[in-house]
Image (cartoon, rainbow, N blue to C red):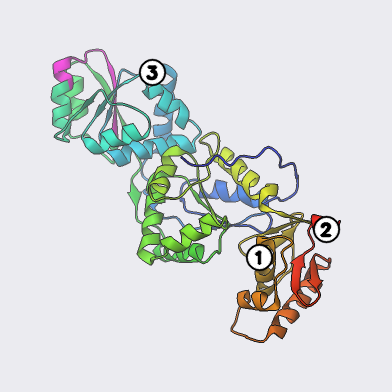
Amino acid sequence: MGRDRRRDGVTTLGPVLAGTQILVTAQRRASDLSLALGRRGAEVTVAASLGVESHIDEDTLLAQTRQMIATGTDIVVVTTGIGFRGWLDTAEAAGIGHDLVEALQAVRLVARGPKARGALQAAGLTPDWVAESETSAEIADFLVAEGVEGMTIAVQHHGAGDDGLEKRLAAVGGRPFGLVVYRWGPPPDPAAVDRSVRDAACGAYDSVVFTSAPGASAWLGAVRAAGVEDELRRLEKDRRVVLAAVGHVTADPLRSAGFDPLLPDRARLGALVRSLVMYLGDASVSVSTTAGDLRVRATAATLDHAVLPVSPSGLAILRMLASEPGVVRSREELLAVLPGESDDPHSAEVAVARLREAIGRPIVQTVVKRGYRLAVGEVAS
């Protein structure tokens, strides 16, 4: 299960995501996410792992979904696993995913084949009947034999057309209607996706955000194609990057791949943003120094949420010192993490001097003949 890393202790009203780099992998609602995260100080990069064909009417799909939730329906036919997951993704992004799943628990569910059944089960739902032949014709035969006169029947499609299923059900007195889910397409900028996975594996992002299960699967596919899955796992383990999903459906591919995504308490974009704010802004990811709370981000460092004008060398030093606050690090240890290939310990001394000048506050202490450490609260008292 994903960790619900929600915190109630963040009360800072300033830009708590100042200095953070966040990758959004979605095309749908990307501008909304970028705006909400940007308001809190984050720098946002968008690299959609899948495209969405625009001729699918998402507004109509959501209107039908809300109507189903409000008034109910008798039967729901799930024709494809990816289509059903796409329907749940759309509902999750609109903030009605939980309501939809609850409504479906009271409905007779018919699945076309094992993939559709698996998608239902992944959402915590149990189909009443499965067409093992994976054909709409078998579903039609079954429902016609059972009798559907006067019943409302939602038929989930992935793409256009229903193979005559709705026509046959209507001919025997049923009241079918189609739920047309948007079609996934190739990413609008494949090079940007490849660049995003390589940058993520190099520690360039504090968080990677997902809003759909197919999008998460596609991005993970790009990760594997680039051969950087192990690097990404190490960064997650070291808490240098957090993968965040809008809801449990979206999180499933990440969990299946062995990652541990951050989840909001409700499957809504607003709740996802709040979870990121709470997680990345929480005191547990900061170091309390004598000059304020230090946070070392992917590409920046902040002191009480104010971005420090440090160089890449200064950032590397702060990252090492903050990894074990108060522990003394030798010049040789600091030299090993500095960019470049210098083997002169004096280079570490120069980098520390420049770091101190950039920060303007005495948070890096010299320990005579031993090295350097952060001036954490316990040390300075």
Comparing 141 with 127, the one in front is 127
Q: Could you say whether the residue bearing mark 3 is in a helix, strand or loop?
A: loop
Q: Are the two marked residues, 1 and 3, in contact with CB atoms closer than 8 angstroms?
A: no
Q: Which residue is mark 1?
A: 319
Is residue 363 depicted above or below 77 in this figure? Answer: below
x then y, percent, for residue 134: 17, 36
Is residue 226 depicted above or below 187 in this figure? Answer: below
Q: Which residue is mark 2?
A: 290
Q: Could you say whether the residue bearing mark 2 is in a helix, strand or loop?
A: loop
x then y, percent, for residue 304: 77, 54
Q: Which residue is mark 3?
A: 72
x then y, percent, for residue 28: 46, 47
Comparing 324 with 240, the one in front is 324
Q: CA distance from mark 2 to mark 1?
A: 17 Å
The segment highlighted magenta reads: 143-156
Q: Could you say whether the residue bearing mark 1 is in a helix, strand or loop?
A: helix
Q: CA distance from mark 1 to mark 3?
A: 54 Å
Q: Residue at x 62, y 85 (%)?
A: 342
Residue 376 magenta: no
Q: Residue at x 63, y 86 (%)?
A: 343
Comparing 283 with 42, the one in front is 283
Comparing 90 with 352, the one in front is 352
Q: Are the two marked residues, 3 and 2, in contact with CB atoms closer than 8 angstroms?
A: no
Badge 1 density bin: few <14, some 14–19, many ≥20, Cα 10 Å? some
Q: CA distance from mark 3 to mark 2?
A: 60 Å
Is residue 37 depicted above or below 368 in this figure? Answer: above
